[in-house]
Each structure stands twice: as structure tokens, then as C-alpha cells.
Image (cartoon, coloured by chain):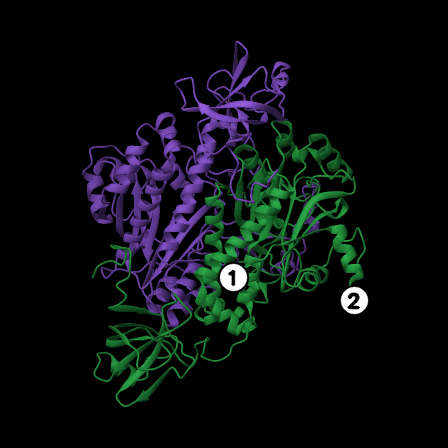
Chain colours: A purple, B green
Amino acid sequence: MQSRFDKLRRTHLIMCLLVQMCSSELPFSRCFSFINMQVNDGSAVSNIQAVVGSDVEGYDKIEAGLVNTGASVAIEGVLVESQGSKQKVELKATKLTLVGGTDPASFPIQKKKLSREYLRSVAHLRPRTNTFGAVARVRTALAFATHQFFREHGFVWVASPIITASDCEGAGEQFCVTTLIPSSHEDPKTPLSKVPTTKDGLIDWSQDFFGKPAFLTVSGQLNGETYATALCDVYTFGPTFRAENSNTTRHLAEFWMIEPELAFADLKDDMACATAYLQYVVKYVLENCKEDMEFFDKWVEKDIVTRLTNVVEKPFVHVTYTEAVELLQKAKKKFEFPVKWGADLQSEHERYLTEVAFSGNPVIVTDYPKEIKAFYMRQNEDGKTVAAMDLLVPRVGELIGGSQREERLEVLERRIEELGLNKESYWWYLDLRRYGSVPHAGFGLGFERLVQFATGIENIRDVIPFPRTPNSAEF
Amino acid sequence: MQSRFDKLRRTHLIMCLLVQMCSSELPFSRCFSFINMQVNDGSAVSNIQAVVGSDVEGYDKIEAGLVNTGASVAIEGVLVESQGSKQKVELKATKLTLVGGTDPASFPIQKKKLSREYLRSVAHLRPRTNTFGAVARVRTALAFATHQFFREHGFVWVASPIITASDCEGAGEQFCVTTLIPSSHEDPKTPLSKVPTTKDGLIDWSQDFFGKPAFLTVSGQLNGETYATALCDVYTFGPTFRAENSNTTRHLAEFWMIEPELAFADLKDDMACATAYLQYVVKYVLENCKEDMEFFDKWVEKDIVTRLTNVVEKPFVHVTYTEAVELLQKAKKKFEFPVKWGADLQSEHERYLTEVAFSGNPVIVTDYPKEIKAFYMRQNEDGKTVAAMDLLVPRVGELIGGSQREERLEVLERRIEELGLNKESYWWYLDLRRYGSVPHAGFGLGFERLVQFATGIENIRDVIPFPRTPNSAEF
């Protein structure tokens, strides 16, 4: 047999690679002297039907009850026009091989409606279901479209560090990364006395792997800026972490972020880039994942295809934070959280703006009060606001948050001091303003929120293969 | 002014975005009434020359000594045929704006030969140099080509988890991820007494974020297998970690891995995929990074373009481990480490095979003794070897390591027991063999080694933006 990669394509007409018997009908039904099997190789939501006659080699395995839902089989045969109305073609089998059987009594993914919560407990098997297969394919398409968008526009991909001794936002709860605790999977019992200390009873960081406390990154932005101010436009695409004890449908302890950074750019460029990016990746998915999107439209979120088409075709609305607050104050809706100038917008406010006030259009809100935004955002001339922007979309709320960065050394230093941050630890960040400073801007996008937005899946734990949340790091 | 993203392209003929004055000549030379400046926007190694006449707005800034190497400038002008022989076109300036100046006395990246070691200490500024700019562009091209290769062949990208309670290889030194140690950047003084303990003086993992010990992943392979056995072909591309105290030019504590996993595939498919992948990405770089590759050929590794062209064009050599050992035993070269059947090949052996024995061709060595390979590799019928493969290339040695996975439940369970591993912790991995098991195979490739291979850069710390090594997690 030729290797599949010799010609870099499958000989799929003769030998079909088949993973599962997963049919919305009965797994197979007997009629006369042949059996119909619904089989799927993971490349699409829809199954292919294989017709296995009683004269076919391997038919005895079926008769013996060895071929069950979840088994993997190899079926050789020819594609023929289908007799039924459900599909155009079917595979007329000439040989069936049972590659790997299953025990029907214990197989955790039986062909019945399974709750998403249950499926999280078998995250190693859930990609075998329709929904999670479709999510995986759309996720892949969104990731590829992301790389392709930035590649087409000349951006350099920067692998921002995961382990870091920096703290981007001056706050943010971080995970500590250490080798001081000599634990193992095999024996998690660790006496505290094994952790090295100084004479004063303090943890002796000098004996840690990095010689000082190190953490998992909460954002690659500051590192991205170093490359943007050298090579113009860059982006990061990598995992980031928050050790926040949030048990919501919107939060993960580990998630992937996309953080572009544009040099010689202002907030307007930043908004234009975010708009072009979002429209590009959504269009890519609509064009390249048609069948999966029809599946989501039918089973997960009614009319999601229309909602996404609107995003691609309609202009995004621009309002300032001040205008948004006025709109919300005039709104007839009762909000749980009060709206007043100076307070951060809550998820309910954001969704009202995009879903109601602007009838489903994405909305970019700009120029937030400086007190509720990070130290590095560029101060506007009014002395009260900064050149920040949040992009709000229906269902998800804030999808993108960005800003023009403060490129003026003195202004930035003053802000760091005002906020009581440790200026010394930002020495390299300040160097970017000391030597050939440029106006620059960027934004961050949580990739899993984008997948939620594009699939309609409600819980963020269902759009990443192995979600990490408080008390959960299985698999 | 129009936003740069309104039409998704730069109006670069009128306004050139310029980051640096970095010339191999003097930064600028005065002759008659104009000044030549070498400027660069980070999109290529070669600079563009801007000619600024004394009648041009902004010329006074130059005369006042404010425009120095490392400054950022904006120059409006028209592209004209160059008078000199070095370049085809140059920018005849009509207006010069100093965007951000530098202090020439303290600027750390002066226009002189700087050691790579020194540049590591200013990793936030080193992308402004020729070499690190070129590395960043080739890295980006290799990453994009990776995604494109797998996309073209229908692979699903799987974000394997970074934080995990699993331990892939049953060994491998891991970093612990914890919130039990209440440290911060601002005040790293942590009394040991703040770490929660049980009554027995053991660290109380139940109070940790994940309720048990958690670690940084050393490989995404086992997680990748869960998706491959559901959706056929998948790949991971993400960071992985080793807490090994290795201070070499080949080791990082944090590095990016690419791990494809093919379902319904054997070792031959795996080798074919690795070959096709490597040839694809190398060809992509040769075609898309011509100027950068000429730069590396001239300044970093003589004839690297020829070496890489050979990789694309020549067939890869296949030998078994047993044949390789015989070859090495017959070799006239004295090795530091002895060669004998059953011992792992050392870097010197690997390089001899690919560089000398097979005159610079990549070599795939297969069928290693099972004792020196991981528990999950498929056992061959001889009872002594496993279906493993290592791909060796000149200069780097082992670039890719892969295997067919043991898909037979009983054989895998027996091996786990033989090695004294904790079978319970592999329950979900074994499930893949319980329910619809399929023959499958995959490999892992350290992305930074690939960048070393493609650029000729000797030290792995110089091919990742912010290297993490023992005692070093700066920036």
C-alpha cells in the first residue's frame, strides 16, 4: 500500500477511513440481505452511508454483534449514486474490516442526547460528537484565517513569553511557576519543610529555577510592543492565564489571545484594523465552513449565519464612552448595575448597546475614563479620558479591547508614579519611549470568545479542547 | 488622513514609515547641500536611502544634531531612480519629521558590531538589528507555512492544554503551577508560613487553584491523540516546558512544539508526513524570504541556501537504528560517547550520520530499542524494538522525533505496568484504545530548532524573542 503522504492525498474513493458509526437513525438497520451504516471520518458533520451486503467480506463481524457505535472500521468500496433521498452518494462496500471495537455497555458516548456538562467529564471523547467536531473545525478555520490575515498584511508573528517576571497590567491575578515545590504526579504528598527558606523563614527564591519569582503571563502586549517599535506591525497568538476564581460561562484560567500591535498608528488605525480583522475571519468561516455553520444555525443558535453575515457586511458603529453612557441613561431598560460616567460598562450594558441600541451591529466604544483603564493607554487632551476602544458584539459583549499606547516618556512615567507602580520593573518598556519612540496602538482578542461568537456555543468551556477552571485541570 | 486600514495597504510612496537610521556606512554623510540617510521600516533587511536636501522642511533638525541612529522619523517624498549603484530607487524627501529622538550617548544598539550575548541583555531592542529582524521574519514565515501545510491537508489544529495534571512521558522535569504561594512582583518576600498546610505538615493541595498539583505541559501529544482518534489528522502548535537545568545552545525551558498526529496511519505514513512537512516549510522560506536568506548565507552560515535547497530536492535517507549503529561502529571518527546497540544516539553520532555518512542529506532512523523510548510507542514483532523514528539534519542533529503509537490495549497496559507507571492516571489515554482504537502515528518538532536549522543561528536563545533559561526570565 502506498503511503498516504506519498502523493499527499487520500485514496479515499477506494478505501474510506471511518471512525464512527454515528447516525441519527439507528446505527444500522437490517433489511433483506444488506445493512446500512452511517460512518464519519471527522472531516465534516455529515456522515456517509455505507451499504454492506451479506456477500461482503467482513459481514460476519456485523452479524456477530462486534461492530457497534463508536467502533472504528475500514471499508473498501466504490462510491455510487444513492438510492435514498438523504444523500447524493453512498459507499457500496466490497470489504469491511473491524479496526477497533467497542464495548457497547460501557462506551461513554452512546447515540443519545448527552448534556454538555456530562461531555466535559469525558473531554477526551467529546470530539467524537457532531457538535464538538464542528467546533474543532471552526476553531481551526478561525485560527488559520487569523494567521492568514496578518500574513497578508505583513505582520510579524511574535511568540510572547509564557513564563515571565513581568506583570503587564500592574494587577491581574497570576499563577506562580516554580520548581521549589518538589511534587510529582506519582506522589503529591509534599512536606512543607522541603521548600527551601532563608534564615528569616522567607521562601528562598534564589534557589528557584529562574532565581526569582516567575509567573504565567496575563498578556503578551508589552513584549509585543518591543517588536512593533522595531519591525512595525506584529501580532501575538498564544496562551495567556488568569488565576481568578471565576466560575462563569465567559471565563477560563487558560485561554488563547491574539494581540496585534501597529507602529506609526493611532486609535483610528487600531479600530480600522480590528474591524478589518473581524470581518475577514468571520467571512472566512462563512465561506469555508458552510456545512458546520448550517449545523450551528440549525442546532445551536437560530439565524447565526444571518447574524455573522451582518458583521461582514454592515459598517461598525462608533460611539464615545460619554455618548454610550448617555444612551444607556436614556434607555428604558432596567439595569442591574447603575450607569454613571466614570464607572466601567458591565456586560449587560455592552450587550444592550450592540443588541438593542444599535440593532445587532458591532459597536466600537472609544475614549474611556483613564481611571478605569490601564496605565499604558494614551491620555487624551481633555485630561480625563484615554485613547481606548472596546469592540462590542451581540451575545458576547466585549470581544476586543484596545488602545493607542502612551508613547510620550514623561507622560507615561508620571502615570506609572501616580498609580504607585514600580517604575524600575518597567525599565525596558520605558526604553521603547527613550529610543526612537513611535505612536503605536494595538488590541487584544480572546480567541475562545471569538469561537463562541462564531459558533453560538454558550459556555466558553465548550469551545476549547481541555478547559482549565477552578478545581479543574483534568486530561 | 486616511486610516492605513481603510484600504488595507500603506500609502507608502508618499509617506514612508521609518524606524531607524541604520546604515553600514556612516549614518549620514554631508556633501554639498543634502544628506543621505539609511532608513528601514522593518519589512526587509535592506535599507532604503532617503535624500534630504537643505531646502527640505525638517532639515534644521538634522543640522541641530537631533536626528541620530535609532531615531524614528517620517519622511514624505517621492521614489526616484537612485544616482548611486547600491540601490535601484531612493526616496527624494520633501518633508522630514522627527517622530522620536534618541540620546546617542546612551542608546544601547549603536551602529557597531555587538555580541549576541550582549544583545540578549537588551532583548527588547535587539529586533532593531539586521540579524534579529531577519530571524523574526523567517520565524514568522516558518510558522505560517506550518499552519498552511496542515490546513492544505485537512488537519485540525488542537490547542493542547498548557497547564495539566498529566505527565506525558512518565518522567520529564516539570514546572509546578500554583496559587499557594502568595507572592507578587512588588513584594517578593514570602514567609513560608503563608503556604497552607494540612495537620501533618504537608502542603495542602486542596487549597490550590486546581485542587491538586498542576504542572506546565512537556508535550501535547497525549491530548492530541484524543482528537486524532476522533477527527483523523490533527496537529498542535503551542509552547511546552522543561525544568531541566541545561545551559546549552540547544535547550530552552520554554519552547514551541509542533505535534501532528495521524489516524489510520503507521510509521511509514508518519515518515512521509514529516518529510513532506519539512520540505514544504523549507521551500516556503526559500521562496518567500529570499533577501533574508541571502543575508544569512552571507553573514551567518556560508552556503545555507544550498544546504536547504538540498533538503527540498534530495530524497531523505532511511536506515534502521541497528544499521545506524553498525555504520557508527565502522566509522573512522573517534566519538566521545561509545556506540553500542541499546544505547541512545548522542548528538555527535546523529550529526556524523547526516553530515558525514550521508553527505548532508537528512536521515530518518527507525526502530529503536524499546528501552530507550517512551511507553506509548508501538512494539515491533521482534520484541526488542519499537516503531519509532528520528529525523536527523546537518548542524542540528535530531529535528523531529516520532513514532507509531501502541493502539493495542493489552500491550499498552502491560508496558505501563512494566515501567511502573501509575495506570490510573492514564485512564483517559487508555480509553482511546478501549473504544474504537485505530492505528495512529505522529511526531514532535521543536520549532526553535527548526528556526536554527533554517537560519544557521548557532544559539537557540537567539531564535526566540525572549528566551527562558536557568536564572533568566527577564522581559
For the view shown, which residue lies furthest in the bottom direction?
Answer: B32
Nearer to the camera, A105 or A295: A295
Front-most of B340 and B306? B306
Q: In the image, is residue B163 above or below residue B69? A: above
- Circle count: 2
Image location of residue B3, percent across then percent down: 24, 58
CA distance for labels 1 and 2 = 41 Å
Q: Position of residue A435 (x, y in %)?
A: 39, 72
Q: On the image, numbered disc 2 is attached to which residue? A: B332
Depth check: A131 or A223 in front? A131
Q: Residue at x 76, y 39 (%)?
A: B420
Circle 2: element type: loop
Q: Is residue B9 left or right of residue A466?
A: left
Residue lying furthest left in this view? Answer: A330
Chain hosting mark 2:
B
Q: Secondary structure at mark 1?
A: loop
- Amino acid type at image mark 1: Phe
Q: Position of residue A187 (x, y in %)?
A: 71, 41
What residue would you read off at disc 1?
A: B466
Whether residue B165 appears in this view of the structure is: no
Label located before the other in sequence (1 or 2): 2
Return the residue nearer the eye: B102 or A247: B102
Residue type, label 2: Lys
Q: Position of residue B44 (x, y in %)?
A: 40, 67
